[in-house]
Each structure stands twice: as structure tokens, then as C-alpha cells.
Image (cartoon, rainbow, N blue to C red):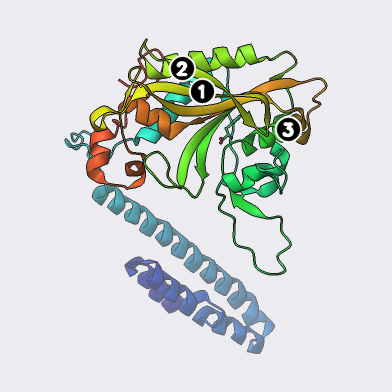
């Protein structure tokens, strides 16, 4: 037994890693290890011999086991010391001197408008981009035969035969988030919902994927006057210039009654887009008083509650504010364009510091 002890404690002391330790453990105290084999011999001994040999074998086993675990933690400590010695980082090194990435104008505009609406008491709500056609259309008072479905150039999700899940679409606007917010929060509500939307359309001011921000305010006494004030305050704050001219036009949406669209005066001269001058108008938003059927579809009582909603094109706001004439370039991922129109990553927009400085 003394030989066994000397042999294994010596091996343990010399072991260089955990694998070596495990091999020693199996050979010494494993089920078929040397100590176990010795224990089997106990059966052949006289009771007197056994009384001496039994406890001595158990003590040997314990001793080997504790030597194993002491060595194991010593190895782990050494490994940690080694990592701490080699994997260190000099946090006092200067940052890279050349800006590699930048904030996309759509992200910048989204941050800016979120800051403005937060100041007006609106919180941010979200919904899925792959939306049920019930949320995107039916709940918004656009039943399946309605011409607005065709006008929207909707991308429908592929369906295989026998698929009995509800049909889904790539949302064509952020208005379904009105329904989701009402379902989730009930009344009263004051939210904005920025995010990507999709329509099959492509020219200088249209891309198949673009961005909107929905606004929804529901309470007992909200009026069209509140809507007009909120939109005017927003536009003034967003463009940070005095001479912005807005045009409210009577319009029609199935989900609002009455409805209004808002255009901004601009000029496109010489490939340059400028706001507040010229004879052109760029439509930036649709709005109106939420239709009672829509309020009911959201699970709120239209006899008690009413409110306004609007949907603003974020990309168009960015085009106007930063003078970017072609929307298609927004999504080309051309680094030269991003370097020219992008924003510094650490420049967080807020109303006090000036939004885009
Ligand atoms: N969803 C409309 C669109 O995409 C915009 C809108 C939103 C109009 C809310 C009225 C109210 O054109």
C-alpha cells in the first residue's frame, strides 16, 4: 500500500494538465483502478486481516482523491494566471483616428424624431414587419375587396397548399401598429411607431423598403386641432429652420375620418433639394381622426374614446432635411455616399443640444 501511495502521489505532483490527472484518477481510484482491485481481494482475507486492510485501503483512496482535487485547482489557478498575463488590453491607447462607420441618415432622422415626440409625451411602440393581413388591412377598415389593397402594391408571403395559418404580408405601412398598441395598452394611448415598411414601387422618391413613423393619440377629448398642433410643432422642431411651409390637404384614408395629407414646400433645382423655397410640394404624411371601426377593432369603445393618427415618411424627412435628392441611394450601401451623408456615431440627437449638430 505504501508503494501504491508513493507511486500515485508522485504521478499527481508531476501531472501537467487535466487530461493527465484524469488518466491517473482512472488508473488509481477508477472502477477498474488499482485500489479497486485491491479492495476486491478483501473477500479472500481472514476477518482479522480485513479489519486492518479495509480501513487502510479506504484511507489510501481518500488521500489520492484529495491530492487529485488539490492538483486540479492548482492547475486551474495556473491557467488563469497565464491568461491574465497574456490576454491584456491597453485601454489607454488612443482611439483609431479615422472614422470607419457612420450613422445612416434614416437612423439619424429616427433618433431625432423620437426625441421630439418624447418631449411631446409620446412613447415608442413596435410591431412585426411580417404582419397578418388582418392587422395590415381588415382591422384598419380595408376589407379584402377594397381598392386600397391593390393600390398599396403589397408583397404577400408565400403560402403552400393546405397552409391554414392566417395570411401574412410585408406590412405596407406602420398603421397596423395602431391596432397592436390598442390591443396591448387599451386607452388612453400616446405612442409613435417608427419602422420599416414595404411596397413594390421604385423611382426617385420610392423604394420597395422604406420607413414610416406612425403616431396615435387616443383619449376622451382629442380633436383635429390637437393633431394639427402636434404636427406643426413636430415639423418646426425637426427642420430647425423658421421658413418651413406646410400645406394641409383634405384627403381620404379608410382608417381615418376626416383625413388630411400634409406637403412641404420645396425646390429641386439643379439636382439640389431645398425646403422652404420653390414651387414644388413633397408629400410627407397622411393623417386624420381614427375611424370608429378602427378603434373598435383595437378593442376600445369608440363611443367613449376618439383620437388622431398620422403616418410620416421618415426617408422623405431625411431627404428634405439633409438635401438628399434620390431616395434609391439610401439603400445602395455605397460607402462613399454613407461617408458623405452619414453622422458621427457619438452625436446623440437631443432637443437641448440641437438635433443634428
Ligand atoms: N398609413 C398611411 C399610409 O401609409 C398613412 C396614414 C397613417 C394616414 C395614419 C392616416 C393616418 O399612406
Q: Is residue 190 visible?
A: no
Residue drawn 39% across the image and 76% down it: 7
Residue drawn 69% across the image and 21% down it: 307
Residue 30 placement (x, y as % from top left) = 53, 77
Nearer the observer, disc 3 or disc 1?
Answer: 1
Please tell me which residue lies in front, 182 or 91.
182
Q: Secondary structure at mark 1?
A: strand
Residue drawn 73% across the image and 35% down it: 183
**Do labels 2 and 1 touch, CB within 8 Å?**
yes
Q: Which residue is mark 1?
A: 262
CA distance separating discs 3 and 2: 28 Å
Residue 204 placement (x, y as % from top left) = 36, 41
Residue 22 placement (x, y as % from top left) = 44, 72
In the rendered image of this protein, does residue 118 appear above or below residue 58? Answer: above
Nearer the observer, disc 3 or disc 2?
Answer: 2
Q: Residues within 10 Å of mark 1 (few under 14, many from 20)?
A: many
Please tell me which residue lies in front, 334 or 4.
334
Q: Which residue is mark 3?
A: 294
Q: Which residue is mark 2?
A: 246
Q: Horizontal placement of 120 versus 289: left or right?
A: left
Q: Is mark 3 within 8 Å of ligand 1?
A: no
Q: Horizontal placement of 293 versus 270: left or right?
A: right
Amino acid at each position: 500500500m505504501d508503494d501504491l501511495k508513493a507511486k500515485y502521489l508522485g504521478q499527481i505532483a508531476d501531472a501537467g494538465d487535466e487530461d493527465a490527472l484524469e488518466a491517473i484518477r482512472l488508473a488509481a481510484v477508477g472502477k477498474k483502478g488499482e485500489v479497486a482491485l485491491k479492495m476486491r481481494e478483501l473477500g479472500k482475507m481472514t476477518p482479522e486481516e480485513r479489519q486492518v486492510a479495509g480501513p487502510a485501503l479506504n484511507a489510501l483512496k481518500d488521500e489520492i482523491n484529495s491530492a487529485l482535487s488539490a492538483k486540479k485547482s492548482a492547475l486551474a489557478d495556473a491557467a488563469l494566471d497565464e491568461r491574465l498575463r497574456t490576454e491584456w488590453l491597453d485601454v489607454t491607447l488612443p482611439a483609431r483616428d479615422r472614422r470607419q462607420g457612420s450613422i445612416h441618415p434614416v437612423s439619424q432622422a429616427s433618433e431625432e424624431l423620437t426625441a421630439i415626440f418624447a418631449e411631446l409625451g409620446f412613447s415608442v411602440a413596435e410591431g412585426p414587419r411580417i404582419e397578418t393581413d388582418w392587422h395590415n388591412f381588415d382591422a384598419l377598415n380595408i376589407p379584402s375587396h377594397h381598392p386600397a389593397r391593390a393600390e398599396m402594391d403589397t408583397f404577400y408571403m408565400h403560402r403552400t397548399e393546405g397552409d391554414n395559418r392566417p395570411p401574412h404580408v410585408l406590412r405596407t405601412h406602420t398603421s397596423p401598429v395602431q391596432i397592436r398598441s390598442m390591443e396591448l395598452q387599451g386607452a388612453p394611448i400616446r405612442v409613435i411607431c417608427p419602422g420599416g415598411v414595404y411596397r413594390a414601387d421604385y423611382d426617385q422618391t420610392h423604394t420597395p423598403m422604406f420607413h414610416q413613423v406612425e403616431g396615435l393619440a387616443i383619449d376622451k377629448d382629442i380633436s383635429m386641432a390637437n393633431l394639427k398642433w402636434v404636427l406643426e410643432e413636430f415639423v418646426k422642431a425637426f427642420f430647425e429652420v423658421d421658413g418651413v411651409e406646410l400645406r394641409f390637404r383634405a384627403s381620404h384614408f379608410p382608417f381615418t375620418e376626416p383625413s388630411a395629407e400634409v406637403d412641404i414646400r420645396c425646390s429641386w433645382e439643379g439636382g439640389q433639394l431645398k425646403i422652404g423655397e420653390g414651387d414644388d410640394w413633397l408629400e410627407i404624411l397622411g393623417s386624420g381622426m381614427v375611424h370608429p371601426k378602427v378603434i373598435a377593432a383595437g378593442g376600445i369603445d369608440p363611443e367613449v374614446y376618439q383620437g388622431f393618427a398620422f403616418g410620416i415618411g421618415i426617408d422623405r424627412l431625411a431627404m428634405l432635411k439633409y438635401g438628399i435628392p434620390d431616395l434609391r441611394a439610401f439603400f445602395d450601401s455605397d460607402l462613399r455616399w454613407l461617408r458623405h451623408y452619414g453622422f458621427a456615431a457619438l452625436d446623440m440627437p437631443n432637443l437641448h443640444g440641437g438635433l443634428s449638430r
